[in-house]
Image: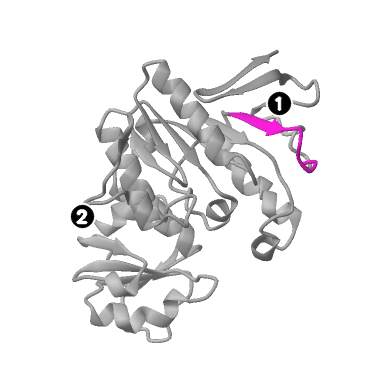
Amino acid sequence: MILSKLLKNCKIIETNVDLNVEIADIEADSRKVSENSAFVAVRGENRNGNDYIDEAINKGAAIIISDVAPNEKEIPYVLVENARETLAKMYSEYYGNPTKALNVIAITGTNGKTSTAYCLYNILRKAKRSCGLISTIDCLINDEVVDLGGGGDVCDIESAMTTPDPKKLYSLLYIMKEKGAEYVVMEASSHAIKQKKLDGIEEFDIGIFTNLSEEHLDFHKTMRDYFDVEQYIKKLEQSENIQSCESVPIPDIEENQNYIFVSYSHKDYKKVYADLAYLYRAGVRFWYD
């Protein structure tokens, strides 16, 4: 694909190359770089992709994309505003922006993401809707495990991640679109939001916020950063956001007028509440109002 097309939705600061060149692949892992690929140097918690630029060049990378200008000016590079955001948008473009053809339901929050995702997925399947699921446990399309090739469950490869890295995430979304999915239910972890893995998704059709508690503060540092309102709400301009009342109070969320706010609980009489829940081997039964 032409590099300028891959970067058309990205914020470019400067470059020293002609962007109208063909790129064979996109890679953020220098160990997997191949001939004529674009290496996106992402700064992680423990490693900095900029430290591996020489390795990527030696393996055949045609272009380096980073939010830090390289020390050696002869290196072909594109300086962008944010490398993580660029990586997600490039993969989305590479796979034809698959979410434009999908109804995306994203679920975030400290607890309950997987359970909520499975409930919604099964409701849609019972309603005879073609649906994909991206969760910590499974990646499914119409009840079949999605395999990215090479055998095995794609979620076994990266089971530690609630939301896959961009390379796998957008390829999964592409496969789901090609297999005729109407809906995709996906877990959107707070880590994934902060790491901009979802920035290639232009808009969520429905966003569900389950709850917020004081976990992962080693990563997020503060509760406000954990919730990351500004980052997530940008994705919900025309969507329906659902918040559990059994959570830490969320600053400013109900005052935002860009989306429909619906709260729910099984304890307090909010807009939607459940009562008299019964647990069966086949599932859960409850009444709601």
Vertical arrangement, residue 4 with respect to residue 248, above or below: below
Q: Position of residue 115 (x, y in %)?
A: 55, 36
Q: Position of residue 274 (x, y in %)?
A: 70, 20
Specify start and end residues of the magenta stretch as a single range: 240-250
Q: Residue at x 33, y 31 (%)?
A: 143
What residue is pinned by disc 2?
150
Q: Is residue 163 visible?
A: yes
Is 247 included in the stretch rendered in magenta?
A: yes
Q: Which secondary structure, mark 1?
A: strand
Q: Residue at x 55, y 51 (%)?
A: 193
Q: Is residue 90 visible?
A: no
Q: Nearer the viewer, residue 198 or 131?
A: 131
Vertical arrangement, residue 269 with respect to residue 115, above or below: above
Q: Position of residue 145 (x, y in %)?
A: 31, 40
What residue is pinned by disc 1?
264
Q: Residues within 10 Å of mark 1 (few under 14, many from 20)?
A: many
Which quadrant would the N terminus be assigned to in this image?
bottom left
